[in-house]
Amino acid sequence: MRLFSRWRITVAIFMLGVIPAAAAKPAPWWQAETAMGTNGTLRLDTKPWWERATALKAGEQFSLAATKTGGMMLVRKEQAVNPAHGQMIVWILDDDGDMDANNPRLDTDSDCYVVDYNGDGTVDRMVDYIDNNHDNIQDEMEIRFFRDSQLRYAWFAFDLDGDGHTWYMRDYEVSGLFPFFRSDPYGNNLFFLNKFNPIDKTWIPFSECPFAFHDNDGDGQSEVVARFSAVPRSFMKQNGNPDYANRYQYMYGPFTDEMRDMGVVNLRYSFDIDGLSDAKHPLHYEMGFNMVGDLPYHFRGMAHPNALRREPQTANVAPFDQTKKISETYPADETGFSFMEFEDGAIQIGDPAGDEAGDRRWEGVFWMWNRRLMHNTGGPTQFWNIRREWSNRPATRREVYYSPVDRRLHLKGASEGWIRIGKIADDAEIGEVHMYDADRDGYFDRWEYFETGKALPVRVDRVTGAKNIDFGDNWAAMRKFYTEKALPEALRLDQAIMDAVAVAGAEYATPVAENLKKALERELSPTERRYILDLIRENAYRHWREVSLAAQEKILNTPAKPDHSYSETNVATAKAWLAFQMLAVIDDLYAQGKFAEVAEGIKKLKATK
């Protein structure tokens, strides 16, 4: 009884508050200063220093102590680069306490910048740098985007290679295509977007979440990049915007219930195949997969809490070390395969500060809105000189094979493909090639060659029984074969056919187009050089064949003597008919990609004249 009474007394005392509960740890001063109100609202015109800030002229600033306990702050007025942003009021908080009160200076390791475009009192951006290990080098960075002073979404960056670089900023935001190239898609890095849920006050995966850049060989450059497209899974059941993940109307728009169930509905996965990605040739991706499916956005370890982050302190993204595996096992309902053969001279998609040969997207090689439309593809991307292949076979592996017919890597299971050829050093359009898997065995067996302006193909090759080489998803074996065998062989055989045509006689010579000559004068990768030589070889062979057929056809159609007697004229027709048969055999060998035998056939035909 005595024990029971003591328990009742203790409970009563606790309920009356005589024994206080453990007090919550107070938020750091910088957290309290930037604490958001209802629905993630943050304004500057409620701050006690606001009137003083509005009186500043562009370039002026003042420092002050935090109104709560703790650190130093600066307020200044800046003239924006973008005229639409006008004169900005920027509030800087020295989170790590290293600012000298007598000589206040800013840094990008632990300072936070709250930005008001046009100085109207509403917060538009918050740029926050985080130094996790206190070495005065940023490890994380986030850019928070507000609409009408309400937080809507944020870009996050994790600097995983320790070089201290993340986003390049202009007016405290990453805007436009080309500033991305001055950011850090080089080495190991993770960039991702999260949407703010104002009801639960949490971050959720959204839009491009993540971009994961992988430096496989430790040279400070990226050889692999993955991009996940996170949108509400209900999108799959709707006929809504096919590019949901890239629409600002959803990023800046209000949070909706459908956003509670997010999925990876599109995934891009790109590679540097020829091994040339280095400081001189950055972002040297050639091959990319574009996949559409419905994978719930739930990954072990996707929560990334950080006590140095402002609320909400937990960002959510697929862990960096899982992004390759997820990409290689993603359950795709359809797959697009892209291979960059040469640049697209019609548009500039690379860093304008770089050379022409570096005209490459910073986030890899990916699909386009053309012919086979795959949702959440993004853009802009290359139209000319990039091979596209498409498969609607469900797949949980990315499988590639090598075809000895065109000496190229292809997507296994693709039912169709195409490449538009042109815009090489000038505006000329050359033509295109179509590829089909006519017997549906997973390998291309039909190639159709078109010239610009002609509806019918100039050549159709149907090749069955080709000895294709399967690499599956063994990227190392594929890269070794492609760089050490396939490319050198293709270059050598292109030259062998051109040499054979050259010695066949002056009547077979065809001039090399000036734009192709100009392209060859540039510094090219083996893949790009091979592409240009393929075009020169194709023109040389086609001209040789046309001249040869015309010459033999003229002999065959020479009128015979009335008595059909034996004569030199009729003997010539026999030789011409034999030449026609040899030309057919050579053409069949050419269609099969047996170029060494083609070169020998050209020489043999010349010898029989």
Image (cartoon, grey):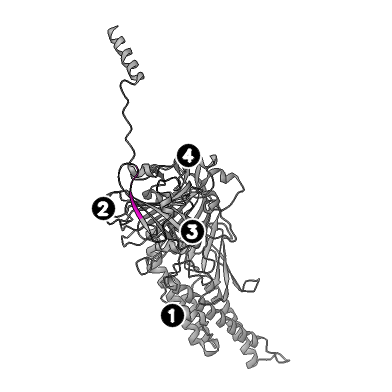
- Of label 2 and label 4, which has the lower sequence position? 4
Q: Are marks 2 and 4 in contact (CB under 8 Å)?
A: no
Residue corresponding to mark 3: 85
Give residue 174's position: percent from left, percent from top: 44, 58
Q: Secondary structure at mark 4?
A: helix
In reply to whether residue 20 is colored magenta, the answer given is no
Please state which amino acid type lies under the numbered disc 2: Asp
Please state which amino acid type lies under the numbered disc 1: Glu
For the point 33% across and 56% down, the residue is: 108
- Of label 3 and label 4, which has the lower sequence position? 4
Question: What's the CA distance linking mark 2 and mark 4?
Answer: 35 Å
Q: Secondary structure at mark 3?
A: helix
Q: Are marks 3 and 4 in contact (CB under 8 Å)?
A: no
Residue corresponding to mark 4: 38
Q: Are marks 3 and 2 in contact (CB under 8 Å)?
A: no
Q: Secondary structure at mark 1?
A: loop
Name the outermost residue toward the right.
562
Q: Residues within 10 Å of mark 3 (few under 14, many from 20)?
A: some
Please state which amino acid type lies under the numbered disc 3: His
Give residue 578's position: percent from left, percent from top: 59, 82
Residue corresponding to mark 2: 135
Question: What's the CA distance linking mark 3 and mark 4?
Answer: 26 Å
Direction from residue 231 to residue 191 in the image, left or right: left
